[in-house]
Image: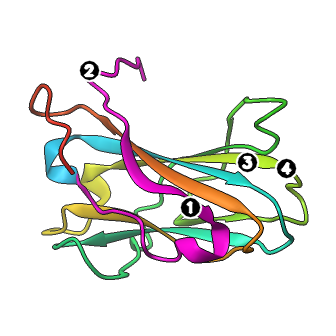
């Protein structure tokens, strides 16, 4: 991806919060305005409780329907992001677990959701989470790819 903030605005999905409070409270992103979206999750381990990240889809900006089997998507991870920002491609999947027994510092997880993998009639996506520790911090950003309307930064 060639990044240009005019063509790839950064949309806040969820401000930094305690990892156990993220749950399914991220903002919804309307995929009808772009070809796809990168979801960037930043996690800083403060306590030892893993976080399971899941991408939800919906016909409206609500619900907790996970993207279905057969629509696995690309995932990249930097397990020690403060000291090595190298994102390593993972096996395509529907969820990703930040295992705090393994990842002991800062972790960045990037999902790429192509609009073509969504269930017919669904146009919204949301990053959901389960688990997490109150002492750990997590945040969510959406970076659209292929915006259909120049300057359209609305959710």
* Residue under pointer 1: 93
Q: Does the image show residue 129?
A: no
**For residue 118, side relative to residue 109 (left or right):** left
First-in-chain label (1 vs 2): 2
Return the mark for residue 105. 4
Residue 103, x across and y down, in percent: 85, 55
Element marked by disc 3: strand
Q: CA distance from mark 4 to mark 2?
A: 32 Å
Q: Which residues are magenta?
A: 1-30
**Residue 6 bears which disc, if any?**
2
Q: Is residue 84 visible?
A: yes
Is 2 inside the magenta-drawn segment? Answer: yes
Q: Residues within 10 Å of mark 3 (few under 14, many from 20)?
A: many
Mark 2: secondary structure: loop
Contact between labelled residues 3 and 1, with CB atoms less than 8 Å apart: no
Looking at the image, do the residues carrying marks 3 and 4 touch, with CB atoms under 8 Å apart? yes
Do the residues under discs 3 and 2 have CB atoms within 8 angstroms?
no
- Where does label 3 land, which residue? 107
Between the C-alphas of marks 1 and 2, the distance is 30 Å
């Amino acid at each position: 991806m060639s990044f240009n903030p005019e063509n790839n605005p950064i949309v806040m999905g969820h401000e930094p919060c305690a990892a156990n409070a993220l749950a399914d409270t991220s903002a919804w992103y309307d995929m009808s305005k772009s070809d796809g979206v990168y979801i960037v999750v930043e996690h800083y381990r403060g306590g030892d409780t893993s976080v399971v990240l899941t991408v939800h889809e919906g016909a409206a900006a609500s619900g907790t329907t996970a993207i279905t089997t057969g629509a696995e998507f690309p995932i990249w991870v930097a397990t020690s992001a403060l000291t090595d920002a190298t994102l390593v491609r993972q096996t395509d999947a529907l969820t990703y677990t930040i295992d705090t027994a393994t990842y002991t510092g800062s972790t960045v997880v990037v999902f790429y959701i192509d609009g073509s993998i969504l269930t017919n009639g669904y146009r919204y996506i949301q990053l959901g989470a389960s688990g997490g520790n109150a002492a750990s911090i997590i945040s969510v950003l959406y970076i659209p790819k292929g915006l259909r309307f120049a300057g359209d930064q609305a959710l």
